[in-house]
Image: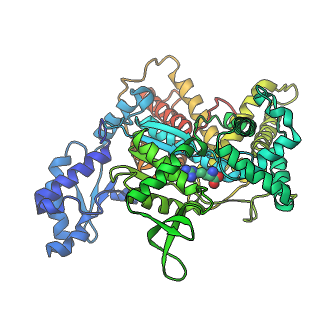
């Protein structure tokens, strides 16, 4: 529930009451309740409940609509014009201009929040995102998770939720046997006491490959590596130090990426849950869920069938006593629910892990690790592909290093900005290198983020520098440019005007009326994002807002002096638009610029 209800929330509440009033309590939650109107001529919102109700009520849809509209009209008279019935039984609702103008006025005077209410019952939300693996390259999938997860956190935080950003780093498992054994041989000095952060493993990926190659080819090494796992599990001091050295080296690499992206999150890797794993298994046992299968411990799943039609097992303990990725996730769920007191746990992880999460969630529910009231939600995203739609690789067929990928975007952005400025600046142009570097970073990093966020996260997306850095279309440069422009117009207009907060809004033209309504949609867009976690809707909204602003600016002079009468109101429109775009970009984890 919201602190100050948005227009849509008010309408939804009114429709519910009207349904009860007209047809009785059992129709309170009829669906679909309220949607945005699909065309301006249908007003601002639509209620399509009448069609679905016709059958149970044994009435014509149009008659249902008119009884409903009759009850609805008085309830909404302060904010909407009289409801209109259209087609087979749609109810069209149009916000009153006076209401819209007053709302825009309060939005412009609302400082940072821009009319977006804070939730009155904040939830504790754990967001598990980024989550790369130690001693392996952080790849484009982790980049997507980092970017999408960060935006989700920012939106939830802005709404007033209590967010815990967790990096579930892959820092435990049998692969550490071969890694530590290899490290002990090639760099024994690294594991001397106190040498942890002086050591640089150099190229960890090569290191990983070397260790793996030896493990696969050399039986003697394999034995040593196996024994090493046992030592590590048993808490041997030297093994633990070696493990720490590897983690620390990876951590530095990850941190470089997070710093470039401006993302903060707390590392709580798989190793953190290691001590809890035996309890997870014994508790599954006491809940009567655990079964033996060839010496391993499994939980048989409901609704997951193997090829032969039998129930599929979730393996939680191997016959050699080792635990699984899933076992750790079960422990993590319990810790997040019990110790972190989470109301909602989100996993921003690629779509390929969908069945892993479905299975783990099911077992967590059945074992009572996560009660019904706690929401567990996998937030899946698709693959990153190359421009050709194939796997994302360098020309040489190697996996792309993330820092290279980000810096390349910054480089290309910088080049084109420099070129444009040289053309505009003419003869005596002298670049301000420091400023140029700063601007390139905002544009380049922003472009990588925006390109990702503006796509429906569930689909695969093609990574293209040319597209993401284009000034045309729904891109970061376009939005940053739009912001700089509106901000410039606003600055010029506000000179000598002072505080805009008491400005009366006038909507004498269709462009003003449309822009005002567009500005008021911000709270709805964020409320929706909070529920369904699709950041592209925010990008779409900002793109539409800037097009609407352009139509406004073409038709409604702000700074020409011929319209003194509307100057304050139009300046307020510029201010509202600039602030909404700035807020939107901020929620997407992007910076803004006054000039590109
Ligand atoms: N480290 C895993 C990977 O790279 C992602 C972990 C996601 N989070 C989790 N709780 N399982 O695929």
Residue 299 percent coordinates (x, y):
47, 65
Location of the C terminus by quadrant is top right
Q: Residue at point 86% right, 61% down?
A: 217
Please name the colour scheme applied to the rendered image: rainbow
Residue 125 in view (yes/no)? yes
Give the total of numbered labels: 0
Front-most of 59 and 425? 59
Residue 103 percent coordinates (x, y):
33, 36
Give the vertical position of 259 relative to 50 (above or below): above
In the image: residue 235, left or right of residue 224:
left
Residue 543 percent coordinates (x, y):
55, 47
Residue 541 in view (yes/no)? no
Give the vertical position of 395 relative to 255 (above or below): below
Q: Residue at point 75% right, 59% down?
A: 392
Give the vertical position of 522 relative to 389 (above or below): above
Location of the N terminus by quadrant is top left
Residue 5 percent coordinates (x, y):
29, 40
In the image: residue 306, left or right of residue 76:
right
Front-most of 228 and 264? 228
User: On the image, which quarter does residue 212 sit in?
Assistant: bottom right
Front-most of 405 and 353? 353
Front-most of 319 and 30? 319
Q: Residue at point 15% right, 74% down?
A: 59
Looking at the image, which residue sits at the far bottom?
Answer: 308
């Amino acid at each position: 529930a919201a602190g100050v209800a948005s227009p849509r929330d008010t309408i939804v509440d009114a429709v519910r009451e009207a349904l009860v009033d007209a047809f009785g309590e059992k129709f309170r939650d009829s669906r679909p309740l309220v949607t945005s109107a699909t065309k301006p001529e249908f007003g601002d919102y639509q209620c399509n409940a009448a069609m679905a109700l016709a059958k149970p009520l044994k009435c014509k849809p149009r008659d249902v609509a008119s009884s409903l509209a009759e009850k609805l009209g008085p309830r909404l008279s302060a904010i909407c014009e009289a409801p209109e019935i259209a087609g087979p039984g749609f109810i069209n609702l149009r916000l009153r201009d006076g209401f819209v103008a007053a709302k825009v006025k309060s939005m412009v005077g609302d400082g940072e929040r821009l009319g977006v209410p804070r939730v009155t019952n904040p939830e504790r939300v754990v967001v598990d995102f980024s989550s790369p693996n130690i001693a392996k390259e952080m790849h484009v999938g982790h980049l997507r998770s980092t970017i999408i997860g960060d935006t989700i956190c920012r939106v939830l935080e802005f709404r007033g939720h209590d967010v815990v950003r967790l990096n579930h780093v892959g820092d435990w498992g049998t692969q550490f046997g071969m890694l530590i054994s290899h490290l002990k041989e090639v760099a024994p000095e690294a594991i001397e006491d106190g040498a942890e952060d002086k050591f640089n493993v150099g190229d960890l990926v090569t290191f990983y490959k070397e260790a793996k190659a030896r493990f696969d080819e050399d039986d003697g090494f394999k034995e040593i590596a196996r024994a090493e796992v046992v030592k590590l599990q048993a808490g041997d001091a030297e093994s633990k130090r070696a493990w720490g050295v590897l983690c620390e080296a990876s951590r530095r690499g990850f941190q470089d990426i997070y710093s470039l992206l401006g993302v903060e999150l707390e590392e709580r890797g798989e190793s953190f849950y290691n001590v809890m794993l035996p309890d997870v298994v014994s508790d599954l046992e006491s809940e009567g869920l655990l079964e033996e299968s060839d010496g391993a411990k499994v939980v048989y799943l409901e609704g997951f069938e193997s090829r032969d039609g039998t129930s599929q097992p979730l393996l939680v303990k191997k016959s050699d006593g080792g635990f699984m990725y899933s076992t750790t996730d079960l422990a993590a769920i319990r810790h997040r629910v019990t110790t972190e007191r989470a109301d909602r746990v989100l996993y921003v992880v690629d779509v390929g892990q969908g069945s892993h999460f479905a299975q783990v969630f099911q077992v967590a529910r059945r074992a009572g690790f996560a009660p019904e009231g706690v929401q567990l939600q996998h937030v899946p995203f698709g693959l990153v592909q190359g421009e050709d739609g194939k796997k994302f690789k360098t020309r040489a067929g190697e996996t792309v290093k993330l820092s290279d990928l980000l810096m390349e975007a910054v480089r290309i952005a910088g080049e084109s900005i420099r070129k444009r400025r040289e053309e505009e600046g003419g003869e005596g142009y002298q670049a301000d290198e420091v400023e140029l570097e700063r601007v390139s970073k905002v544009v380049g990093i922003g472009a990588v983020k925006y390109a990702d966020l503006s796509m429906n996260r569930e689909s695969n997306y093609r990574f293209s520098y040319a597209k993401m850095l284009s000034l045309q279309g729904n891109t970061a440069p376009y939005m940053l440019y739009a912001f700089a422009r509106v901000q410039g117009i606003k600055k010029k207009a506000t000179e000598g005007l002072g505080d805009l907060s008491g400005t009366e809004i006038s909507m004498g033209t269709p462009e003003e009326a449309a822009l005002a309504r567009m500005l008021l949609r911000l709270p709805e867009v964020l409320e929706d994002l909070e529920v369904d976690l699709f950041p592209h809707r925010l990008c779409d909204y900002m793109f539409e807002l800037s097009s609407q602003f352009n139509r406004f600016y073409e038709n409604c002079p702000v700074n020409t002096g011929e319209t003194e009468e509307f100057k304050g109101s139009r300046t307020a429109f510029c201010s509202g638009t600039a602030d909404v775009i700035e807020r939107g970009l901020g929620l997407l984890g992007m910076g803004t610029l006054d000039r590109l």
